[in-house]
Image: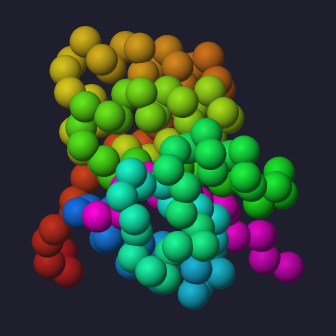
Amino acid sequence: MSPAPVRVALIGTRGFGAVHLRTLARLEEAGTARLVGVVDVAEPPAELAALHHRSLADLLAATPVEDRPQIVAIATPIDTHVPLATEALAAGLDVYLEKPPVPALADHRPLLEAARAAGRSVQVGFQARGGGG
């Protein structure tokens, strides 16, 4: 028996968020992930309307416990990373942040402390490019 797909929410559906949507679609097809919600201040693509929320708090409030995200991927402007990640960590979610993770070096410590306090993880995504080697 294979494990249940990990439940993922995406904050930010444009720009690099669109890349995450394509990746999540592949992971969903493979049965390893399930997109359970998107958060964006603007309307998302039509196919995501049923999953759309204006804030992470709205998404969490509207989602039954068994469908709540376990991970949130954040692909928003850099100055929103720390408040969004801190909110997600406080809600008990693991966080995937696009690079750069924070706007200033001084912001790393509060983010690390929030992750430690929540007992959750923060991963930073970096684009991988290269050949077969």
Which quadrant is the C terminus positioned in? Answer: bottom left
Q: Is residue 17 magenta?
A: no
Q: Quadrant of residue 12?
A: bottom left
Which quadrant is the N terminus positioned in? Answer: bottom right
| Residue found farthest to the left | 130
x and y percentages locating residue 4 in the rendered image: 77, 70
Q: Identify the coloring.
A: rainbow
Relative placement, left or right, of 103 versus 74 is left
x and y percentages locating residue 45 in the rendered image: 39, 76
Above or below 79: residue 107? above
Q: Nearer the viewer, residue 46 or 72?
A: 46
Above or below 4: residue 28? below
x and y percentages locating residue 113 in the rendered image: 49, 15
Residue at x-position 55% and y-position 55%? 53
Residue at x-position 60% and y-position 73%? 50
Q: Quadrant of residue 132?
A: bottom left
Relative placement, left or right, of 48 versus 2 is left
Q: Quadrant of residue 17?
A: bottom left
Residue at x-position 68% and y-position 46%? 60
Residue 94 visible at all: no
Q: Nearer the viewer, residue 100 or 64?
A: 64
Residue 133 visible at all: yes
Relative placement, left or right, of 72 versus 99 is right
Above or below 63: residue 21? below
Q: Is residue 8 magenta?
A: yes
x and y percentages locating residue 26 in the rendered image: 48, 83
Query: Which segment is the magenta one?
Result: 1-14
